[in-house]
Amino acid sequence: MTRRRLNILLHWTFFMMLLAMIKGGTDAVWLRWAYVLLGAVWVGIAIVKGVRAKPSPKLEGILRSTFTIAHAGLYAMIALSILINAGALLGWASKDAAFTSLLIVLVIATFHALFHFWRHNVLRDNALRMISPKFMHKYL
């Protein structure tokens, strides 16, 4: 599996797990552990190989200069969320803190997605094609 395909798989799987846990109130222990493990793998890859996202040549000014920092911040929030959720599963943190961390990651991820949607449609740099499976490219 290429790194691009793995990145796409991690993005969409992590997002669906996040939604499932928020809808279910994080009651499924297996899903919470899967979230922690998947998040740890994703953040681990980012630490070892670096953040894969790069700013588009069409992105200028403050958006271009903060692009990589913002992505690193998103990874940091994911890392914090998986640590809090792992702590809650082990009895070291409250379930409410774990649920709140999921909501915070969802809000940040929503802004992340809106930014890339804006990039794709306004700058026309195909940002959504980079993170979508190939079968969806004809619709983008």
Image (cartoon, grey):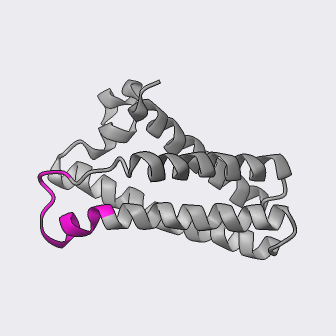
Does the image show residue 124?
yes
User: For residue 69, which quarter of the picture?
Assistant: bottom left
95 to 18, vertically: above or below: below
Magenta span contains residue 100? no
Question: Which segment is the magenta one?
Answer: 56-68
User: For residue 135, which quarter of the picture?
Assistant: top left
Q: What residue is rendered at 22% in x and 54% in y?
A: 55
Taking 55 as reference, is 23 left or right?
Answer: right
Numbered marks: total: 0
Q: What residue is rendered at 25% in x and 49% in y?
A: 120
- The answer to which of 133 and 38 lies nearer the viewer is 38
Question: Residue 44 placed where, x, y %?
Answer: 54, 50
Question: Residue 108 placed where, x, y %?
Answer: 48, 67
- Main SS, magenta region, reads helix
User: For residue 88, which quarter of the picture?
Assistant: bottom right
12 to 29, vertically: above or below: above
Magenta span contains residue 67? yes
Question: Residue 53 placed where, x, y %?
Answer: 32, 50
92 to 127, vertically: above or below: below
Q: What residue is rendered at 62% in x and 51% in y?
A: 40
